[in-house]
């Protein structure tokens, strides 16, 4: 009750209330003037010195109060200066309480001393009016109100009580009740006003925060009232609709806004209709609005939230998200290098296209393209050149194929396309593609001539399964490559038969390898001067239980395709070493190895184990490799051959003259023997040019300190020509022997090396 309001109010409220006490100087002057006037009139009427003293006190304290107010406003205390406000509260309590006591004294003098009816009425009326003013002005300071009320009512009640009759005493008692009611009135006013002030401050704060939220919101927002009129919209929403062709948004019926959107034709009509339907039914959900007419495209996701009859629309620009999703989708369905659809996406596109063409009764053609010798391009020129070749190949296919074709990259160096299936059109299309690939490719400073093989299958009514078509196109491609590459081949029924034959051979070959059903044949190599067998080449043979003897040219490629070749090579090495250990003399055995063997086997270890098991000296074992095998796995081959040569194992370069015939390999790798391909031997007995070429190749081998072998010797005339005009040291061919099984080769070696090759040859001629 008598404590400072500073202890119960927040600083901002406290300072505001203290200011209100010093607020209305004109009302204070008017009250002081009225009080001085009435007190002076009653003093003049009664000629009471006490009343003149009261009049003087009113005048003095009125001037003091006015000066105090002036000083307060000059002090200009801050909004949160609670300490400064407390100082001015104390001054207000002192001056206000003193002035209130003067009013109470005026009533007491008029009633108890002067006892003039006019003086009593005037003093009581003015004082009660002042008490109302105290409640209205000083309501915020409970201490000031309480002291002022006591200072007024105690003297006033005493004046009434001194009359002595029951009426005045009762009135004096009731004035005490009025004291508490006035104090309660001031408290209620204070609570109501402070609550209103707090609510206003809170409303202002919320309004400011809402304004900040709407202004800084990354999305456009607008609110529709119960009549569907846009009642609230932030700046981003206004800009968004301006972009959509609606410059005026606020206070517009949203139906009018959507009609303007439809008229602008910038947004799909289906999206507008769906948004309008959702708003009219006061549903909640999301609608995608895409501005397809703008570049780059702009996409908005509109979130509709309804509560009762009102709707809130949130417009989020999801263009970057859509773009990212489209980019991810494109990457998942397309080849990163060429930009063409990948194998999976091609399957979807091709199935859809086949269904459409089947429904229309149209034929389709599936074409598979394979770049010939692509691995050699990668190995020789690097992957940068290889990638550039793939990109340019894709571009040529795009430009050459019909616009309606579905083109994709299968992987590696293979492409695939689905086109219209008229026979003449397909053949013409294949010819145009082959012609397009006839032009050289300019690749990262390298110019290459690259060939393309094409496999084609035609589906008359587009009714075939895609997987079946791809299998048949693959068969046609395989045939095109087998027949010379750089050409196209249309699938026909015999290929299917051949395919199933190959599949059966694959299964049976796997079983034959697993059950050790292969055999070995050996073809001898003879020293041309002594006609003695110096080594035998070991050759794998397979006799099929149903098809009979399967040529090596058939099952060896199958083994490479199946990944069995290294297992077969390992088997040949072991068995050839065992057979060689049984031969008389120092005759060696030679085994062919492929590029895959350098990857799939640790050749030095396999050969070392085989020699140890057969107890065969390394000098009686030879390894034959082709130039192609060395090129494909140069690093692995160089390491493996170097280790073998260090053990004393001879290394022969087989089929020299059929590959790239690079002399760098003869110098870089540890070759000890050069086997010249049979194509150099065929015409040496009647063609001087062919004989001269063979002689020069042989001389090259001799100059490099290599043993020179001529393959494919079939006539005595060929042998005599080589013996007389070339430096060939060893020969191999049907003139001496076809490949023989293990049981016969030992006898042949014994006959040749025991009696001499010439006697054997003469006996053969007579027989």
Image: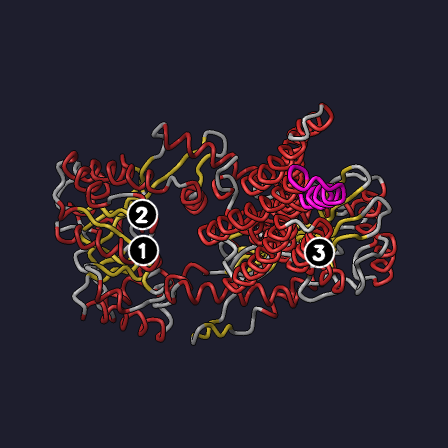
Instruction: Say which residue label 2 marks.
Output: 599
The answer to the question of whether label 2 and label 3 lie on touching residues, with beta carbons closer than 8 A, is: no
- In the rendering, which numbered label is found on residue 37? 3
Secondary-structure class at tag 1: loop
Identify the residue shown where x is 44% and y is 73%.
444
In this picture, residue 546 sits left or right of residue 186: left
The answer to the question of whether label 2 and label 1 lie on touching residues, with beta carbons closer than 8 A, is: yes
Q: Give the residue at the far top of this rendering.
A: 166
- The color scheme shown is secondary structure
In this picture, residue 87 sits left or right of residue 27: left
Using the numbered discs, state the Cα–Cα distance from disc 2 to disc 3 in whole angstroms.
125 Å
Q: Is residue 761 above or below residue 393?
A: above
Q: Quadrant of residue 189?
A: top right
**Part of the protein shown in magenta:** 111-132
Q: Is residue 600 magenta?
A: no
Q: Is residue 112 magenta?
A: yes
For this rendering, which residue is in front, 568 or 96?
96
For this rendering, which residue is in front, 417 or 1?
1
* Residue 412 visible in the current orientation: yes
Q: Is residue 300 above or below residue 681?
A: above
Secondary-structure class at tag 2: helix
Identify the residue shown where x is 87% and y is 52%.
255
Instruction: Say which residue label 1 marks.
Output: 633
Q: Percent from the top left, x then y, of residue 244?
A: 77, 62
Q: Earlier in the sequence, mark 2 or mark 1?
A: 2
């Amino acid at each position: 009750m008598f404590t400072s309001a500073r202890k119960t109010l927040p600083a901002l409220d406290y300072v505001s209330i203290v200011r209100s006490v010093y607020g209305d100087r004109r009302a204070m002057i008017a009250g002081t003037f009225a009080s001085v006037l009435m007190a002076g009139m009653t003093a003049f009427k009664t000629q009471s010195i006490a009343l003149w003293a009261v009049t003087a006190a009113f005048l003095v304290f009125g001037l003091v109060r006015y000066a105090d107010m002036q000083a307060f406003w000059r002090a200009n205390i801050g909004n949160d200066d609670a300490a400064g406000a407390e100082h001015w509260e104390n001054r207000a309590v002192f001056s206000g309480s003193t002035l209130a006591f003067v009013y109470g004294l005026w009533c007491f003098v008029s009633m108890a001393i002067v006892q003039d009816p006019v003086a009593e009425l005037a003093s009581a009326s003015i004082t009660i009016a002042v008490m109302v003013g105290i409640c209205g002005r000083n309501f915020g300071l409970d201490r000031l109100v309480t002291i002022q009320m006591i200072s007024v009512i105690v003297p006033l009640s005493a004046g009434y009580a001194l009359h002595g009759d029951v009426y005045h005493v009762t009135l004096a008692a009731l004035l005490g009740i009025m004291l508490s009611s006035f104090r309660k009135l001031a408290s209620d006013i204070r609570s109501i006003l402070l609550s209103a002030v707090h609510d206003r401050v809170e409303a202002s704060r919320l309004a400011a925060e809402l304004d900040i939220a709407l202004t800084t919101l990354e999305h456009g927002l607008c609110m529709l009232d119960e009549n569907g009129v846009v009642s609230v919209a932030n700046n981003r929403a206004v800009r968004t609709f301006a972009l959509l062709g609606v410059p005026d948004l606020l206070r517009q019926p949203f139906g009018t806004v959507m009609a303007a959107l439809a008229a602008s034709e910038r947004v799909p009509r289906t999206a507008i209709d769906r948004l309008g339907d959702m708003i009219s039914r006061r549903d909640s959900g999301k609608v995608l609005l895409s501005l397809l007419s703008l570049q780059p495209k702009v996409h908005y996701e509109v979130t509709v939230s309804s509560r009762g009859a009102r709707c809130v629309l949130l417009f989020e620009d999801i263009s970057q998200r859509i773009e990212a999703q489209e980019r991810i989708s494109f990457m998942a369905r397309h080849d990163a290098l060429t930009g063409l659809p990948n194998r999976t996406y091609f399957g979807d596109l091709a199935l859809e296209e086949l269904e459409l063409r089947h429904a229309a009764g149209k034929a389709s053609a599936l074409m598979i393209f394979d770049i010939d010798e692509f691995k050699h391009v990668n190995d020789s020129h690097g992957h940068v050149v290889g990638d550039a070749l793939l990109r340019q190949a894709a571009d040529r296919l795009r430009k050459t194929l019909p616009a309606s074709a579905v083109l994709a990259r299968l992987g590696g160096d293979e492409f695939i396309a689905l086109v219209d299936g008229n026979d003449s059109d397909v053949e013409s299309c294949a010819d145009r593609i082959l012609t397009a690939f006839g032009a050289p490719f300019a690749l990262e400073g390298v110019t290459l001539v690259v060939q393309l093989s094409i496999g084609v299958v035609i589906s008359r009514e587009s009714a075939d399964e895609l997987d079946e078509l791809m299998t048949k196109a693959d068969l046609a491609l395989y045939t095109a490559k087998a027949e010379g590459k750089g050409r196209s081949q249309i699938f026909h029924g015999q290929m299917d038969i051949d395919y199933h034959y190959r599949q059966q051979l694959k299964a049976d070959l796997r079983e034959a390898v697993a059950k050790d059903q292969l055999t070995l044949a050996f073809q001898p190599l003879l020293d041309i001067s002594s006609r003695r067998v110096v080594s035998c080449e070991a050759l794998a043979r397979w006799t099929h239980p149903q098809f009979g003897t399967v040529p090596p040219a058939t099952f060896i490629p199958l083994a490479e395709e199946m990944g069995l070749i290294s297992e077969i090579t390992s088997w040949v090495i072991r068995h050839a070493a065992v057979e060689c250990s049984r031969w008389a003399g120092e005759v060696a055995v030679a085994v062919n190895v492929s590029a895959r063997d350098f990857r799939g086997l640790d050749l030095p270890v396999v050969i070392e184990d085989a020699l140890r098991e057969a107890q065969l000296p390394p000098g009686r074992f030879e390894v034959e490799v082709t130039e192609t095998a060395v090129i494909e796995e140069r690093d692995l081959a160089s390491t493996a051959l170097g280790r073998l040569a260090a053990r004393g194992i001879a290394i022969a370069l087989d089929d020299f003259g059929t590959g790239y015939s690079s002399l760098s390999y003869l110098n870089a790798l540890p070759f000890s023997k050069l086997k010249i391909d049979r194509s150099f031997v065929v015409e040496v007995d009647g063609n001087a040019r062919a004989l001269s070429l063979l002689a020069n190749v042989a001389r090259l081998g001799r100059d490099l300190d290599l043993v020179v072998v001529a393959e494919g010797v079939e006539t005595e005339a060929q042998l005599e020509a080589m013996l007389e005009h070339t430096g060939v040291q060893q020969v191999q061919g049907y003139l001496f022997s076809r490949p023989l099984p293990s049981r016969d080769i030992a006898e042949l070696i014994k006959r040749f090396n025991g009696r001499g090759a010439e006697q054997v040859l003469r006996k053969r001629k007579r027989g």
